[in-house]
């Protein structure tokens, strides 16, 4: 057990470091060893300029839990039935300030060592740099053995964190536990899954009964040992994608997996509620957008559409393309029209030096799968539109075209999209889409790299083709898709964006600890 004296000593040291002028100087090295975890299983915080939201779990159930924020107590809210999971919502904070944090139980006994966490700059501040660690497809349960072992994924995450990012963006597929699609018998519907976690009852609530135990056994081993407490001083942003709704995006005459049904939405919401934070409000994001301001969530947070606003330097807009997708033919959308309006409005306004789109589904490539922006279908290892893609909706491509056009119209800015989902690393420049000219300011689309994909998860294995350029796009594919694990480090300054690409697949696992970028791209404004 950690002694209270040790906690207070650590908190005092953190408080002293708050005098440092730059958050980079006080962020704990997330890859360090020896930090006293106490009874804490995992910590995943997010921040805005005046608020912290923290998700935590414990090895022992707690009757109560308190987060001390620079000595101010913030009562925790239990998020599960038994008291193993808690969230802490601290508002009224000062922008750009490192805060010493201490977790205690209801009696004031420390639950782990203290640690620092900084808020983001005020929206009107002028920071000179921002660094982001971005990846996708980090999920996978070791008991099913279909993704990289969680220890290898954690090693990749630790390597990314050694570059001291200001924030981490995990873009979709945090969970793989498909229940009804074609590969479900190798995933959440398999005999192994039943032994590991049991079976979900789709007619029963997610909390307060047997489904809650199944959820924890299915989801917990995919998130808790991967992140543990590594990101305690690094804010995280989690975007949901298809597998986070416990299905792959597939459609045939037997079964169409999306839009998600009520059970899928309840399961995705439950996993988010327990394990990773929702998006905090942003002054320029409407509070009434879909999935925002739900009565059973912290005030004014959004579950599906988020903003990382870093002063006047950068605004990063993240959006889930699955929860609200529609099947309305030419008027179908991946995100509601109100969300599209918010995205286009932010791209049109000159508030920040950089505006970046991070959708869960990538523009610029297709692997012939159903739930893509594109109508291309795989045939003999190639993409074609000569054969119709069943249940694909042309309105999805129309929304894609509108968003890319709005991005290209940001004169003086870099029209950058960073996406996941495709289990690959890549970079392409889009000069035209559906006859719409973008060559005056070509859209840069990047695949960040998957953290956890293994053998059968690569598109070339399952679909017969790697990600390729779809039809009716004019592109310069400067980095064709690479099916390897990896991550992206993105550095922002007022005048440019530097992207560093990291990959690992065929080398010994020890090589991860010294991984260096295999490619660097410098994008300059104007």
Image (spheres, grey):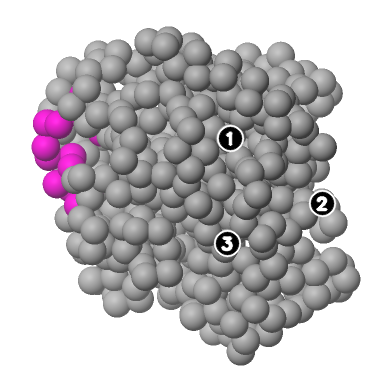
Badge 1 crowding class, 10 Å Cα cut-off, few under 14, some 14 to 19, many 20 or more, is: many
The answer, for residue 366, to whether it is visible in the render is no
The answer, for residue 230, to whether it is visible in the render is yes
Seen from the viewer's position, the closer of residues 12 and 328 is 12
- In magenta, the rendered stretch is 342-356
Q: Would you say 32 lies left or right of 273 here?
A: right
| Magenta-span inclusion, residue 343 | yes
Instruction: Report x, y in % for residue 231.
Output: 59, 33
Instruction: Tell me the residue at 85%/56% (across/down).
Output: 143
**Alpha carbon separation for disc pair 2 and 3:** 28 Å
User: Which residue is labeled 2 in the image?
Assistant: 142
Of circles 3 and 1, which is in front?
1
Instruction: Report x, y in % for residue 252.
Output: 54, 78
Instruction: Report x, y in % for residue 284.
Output: 19, 45
Q: In which quarter of the image is residue 451?
A: top right
Q: Would you say 315 lies left or right of 198 here?
A: left
On screen, residue 121 above or below 392: above
Which numbered disc, 3 or 1, marks the residue that appears first in the sequence? 3
User: Which residue is labeled 3 in the image?
Assistant: 78
Badge 2 crowding class, 10 Å Cα cut-off, few under 14, some 14 to 19, many 20 or more, is: some
Seen from the viewer's position, the closer of residues 3 and 304 is 3
Instruction: Tell me the residue at 69%/42% (across/down).
Output: 109
Which numbered disc, 2 or 3, marks the residue that appears first in the sequence? 3
Number of on-image labels: 3
User: Which residue is labeled 1 in the image?
Assistant: 102
Of circles 2 and 3, which is in front?
3
| Magenta-span inclusion, residue 486 | no
**Alpha carbon separation for disc pair 3 and 1:** 17 Å
Which quarter of the rendered picture does the N terminus lie within?
top right
């Amino acid at each position: 057990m950690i002694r209270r004296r040790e906690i207070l000593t650590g908190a005092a040291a953190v408080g002293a470091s708050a005098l440092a002028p730059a958050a980079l100087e006080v962020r704990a090295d997330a890859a360090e060893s020896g930090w006293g975890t106490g009874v804490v299983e995992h910590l995943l915080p997010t921040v805005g300029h005046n608020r912290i939201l923290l998700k935590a779990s414990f090895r022992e159930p707690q009757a109560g839990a308190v987060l001390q924020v620079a000595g101010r107590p913030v009562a925790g809210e239990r998020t599960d039935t038994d008291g193993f999971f808690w969230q802490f919502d601290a508002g009224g904070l000062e922008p750009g300030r490192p805060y010493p944090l201490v977790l205690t139980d209801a009696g004031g006994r420390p639950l782990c060592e203290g640690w620092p966490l900084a808020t983001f700059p005020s929206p009107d501040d002028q920071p000179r740099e921002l660094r982001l660690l971005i990846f996708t497809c980090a999920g996978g349960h070791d008991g099913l053995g279909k993704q990289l072992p969680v220890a290898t994924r954690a090693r990749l995450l630790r390597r990314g964190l050694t570059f001291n990012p200001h924030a981490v963006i995990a873009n979709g597929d945090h969970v793989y536990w498909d229940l009804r699609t074609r590969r479900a018998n190798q995933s959440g519907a398999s005999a192994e899954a039943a032994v590991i976690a049991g079976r979900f009852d789709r007619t029963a609530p997610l909390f307060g009964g047997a489904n809650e135990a199944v959820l924890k056994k299915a989801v917990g081993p995919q998130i808790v040992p991967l992140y543990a407490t590594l990101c305690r001083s690094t804010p995280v942003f989690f975007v949901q994608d298809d597998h986070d709704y416990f299905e792959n995006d597939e459609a045939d005459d037997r079964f169409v997996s999306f839009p998600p049904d009520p059970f899928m939405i309840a399961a995705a919401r439950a996993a988010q509620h327990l394990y990773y934070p929702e998006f905090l409000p942003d002054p320029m994001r409407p509070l009434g957008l879909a999935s925002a301001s739900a009565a059973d969530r912290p005030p004014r947070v959004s579950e599906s559409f988020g903003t990382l606003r870093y002063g006047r330097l950068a605004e990063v807009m993240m959006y889930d393309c699955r929860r609200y997708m529609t099947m309305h033919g030419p008027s179908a959308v991946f995100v509601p029209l109100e969300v599209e309006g918010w995205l286009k409005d932010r791209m049109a306004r000159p508030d920040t030096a950089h505006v970046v789109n991070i959708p869960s589904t990538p523009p610029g490539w297709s692997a012939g799968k159903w739930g893509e922006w594109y109508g291309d279908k795989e045939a003999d290892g190639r993409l074609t539109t000569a054969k119709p893609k069943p249940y694909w909706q042309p309105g999805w491509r129309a929304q894609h075209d509108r968003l890319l056009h709005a991005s290209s119209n940001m004169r003086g800015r870099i029209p950058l999209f960073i996406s996941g989902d495709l289990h690959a690393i890549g970079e392409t420049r889009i000069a035209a889409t559906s006859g719409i000219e973008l060559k005056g300011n070509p859209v840069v689309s990047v695949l960040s790299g998957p953290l956890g994909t293994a053998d059968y998860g690569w598109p070339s294995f399952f679909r017969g083709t790697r990600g390729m350029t779809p039809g009716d796009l004019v592109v310069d594919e400067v980095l064709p898709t690479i099916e390897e694990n990896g991550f992206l480090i993105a550095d922002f300054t007022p005048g440019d964006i530097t992207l560093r690409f990291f990959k690992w697949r065929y080398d010994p696992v020890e090589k991860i600890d010294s991984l260096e970028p295999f490619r660097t791209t410098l994008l300059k404004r104007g």
